[in-house]
Image (spheres, rainbow, N blue to C red):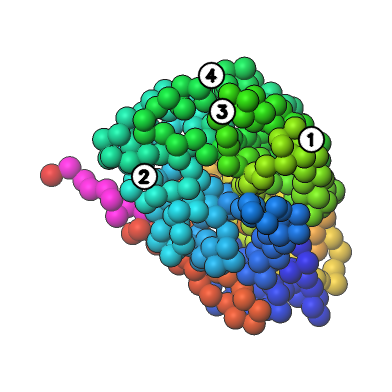
Amino acid sequence: MTHFAYRDNILCADHVPLTDIARQYGTPLYVYSKTALTENYLAYADALKKYQHPETPGLVCFSVKSNSNLAVLKILGDLGSGFDIVSGGELSRVIAAGCDPRKAIFSGVGKTKEEIRFALENDILCFNIESPAELNRINEIAGEMGTTAPISFRVNPDVDAKTHPYISTGLKENKFGVAFDEAFDCYKTAAAMPNIRITGIDCHIGSQLLDDGPLLEAFDRLVILVDRLSEAGIELHHIDIGGGIGIAYHEEKPVAVPDYLARLYTRINAWRNKQYGGKPIQLMLEPGRSISGNAGVLLTEVQYLKTNTDKNYAIVDAAMNDLMRPALYDAWHTVLPVHKREMAAATYDIVGPICESGDWLAKQRDLAVTSGDLLAIMSAGAYGMVMASNYNTRGKAAEVIVDHEQVHLVRRRESAEDLFAFEKVLP
Ligand code: LLP
């Protein structure tokens, strides 16, 4: 996380001390770096530019579920990003941010009629269809609206992503996608439908993949289908390989994005030239975590230090409702003191104020801290704020974006009144 580094013993975001930001905006606070978001996006976009076929420029569709703040979407949209969305709500965000819905691709197993209609009204780029029932529904609605729906099938390649079981999605026992063996027939059915326009094929085998081996394997599986479809007269315009590479939370060593894309394009080109008659085909990607994850931290203030029997706790003002990943996945987030102190460290569990033993952010960390100090929970830009809840009637944290020397508030802190604004007592 090179955009979060110490200067004179104070942790900074770009050049701005996190102490100053906390003083102005309070804690808990999500802090994102615009430069980091930009660089992480460009790692994909520049590699695509380098390797893509000029007739079919690739498209990065940022996975909105990883960080859906409007300002984040706008930064990426302005750089040329498309968007991977999984709900009508996420599409509304893309539009509200002033980004182009015609660059949105819509994934998800449970699209409702209203969501499909809304997506068609906004002329989205493609529906990633996950079942024959969904195909029928989309065809029907497009028919009612007198239009055609661009579609791809999310095919389940039955590849082991070798990641956390909760975020592994490409095995045949998962709820996602259509089975590899049934996909050909799905395409045949779709090709005969009056209000469906087949544009591509898609897969997503899981998240936080450190190695690109399973992704390349998934690609090899997909092109078997692309070839079969082409022989049957169904020509595809794009292949969407799903989410991006994982990130380093601790000591992980993820493959570098440009190296992954170089290897992927070597496969694409070899396949195109040998089997696919040299025809161009567009590559799409849906990275989330690798763009937003290490572009953000969660800032929190130590409220109390406490020792129970032989265990030390640092009780902070952020909690599992702000960052759910540790409680939910046993996930590791590095914790750094914002102010490096010259004092002896002790070993702490970093816990929040919520009434659950699962309310912890980090365990057994050596820290030199005292009450009132700030801690930065690192790598919190993806699946952080988006998964936050209001449990214990805790307002969600504020969010800021640092753009070199400037700090912009991009979501204000929720007040207690915000939390019960939709409720009323009986007459
Ligand atoms: N495309 C689809 C269809 C997805 O389901 C996902 C993530 C992505 C793309 C983006 O994947 P990424 O590039 O971020 O790996 N809450 C979990 C992660 C859930 C991922 C869900 N799908 C976590 O905090 O680790």
Task: Name the residue: 74% across, 69% down.
Answer: 3
Element marked by disc 3:
loop
**Number of the front mark, 4 or 3:** 3
User: Could you tell me which quadrant the C terminus lies in?
Assistant: top left
Pointers 2 and 3 in contact (C-beta within 8 Å) = no
Position of residue 85 measured from the top left corner of the image (x, y, whole percent) = 50, 46
Amino acid at circle 4: Asp
Residue that lies at the very extreme toward the bottom in this rendered image: 405
Q: Residues within 10 Å of mark 4 (few under 14, many from 20)?
A: few
Q: Which residue is mark 1?
A: 274
The answer to which of 129 and 278 lies nearer the viewer is 278
Q: Which residue is mark 2?
A: 120
Q: Which residue is mark 4?
A: 185
Q: Which residue is mark 3?
A: 233
Indicate yes or no whether the magenta region holds residue 422: yes
Task: Name the residue: 28% across, 40% down.
Answer: 146
Q: Residues within 10 Å of mark 3 (few under 14, many from 20)?
A: few
Q: Is residue 127 left or right of residue 290?
A: left
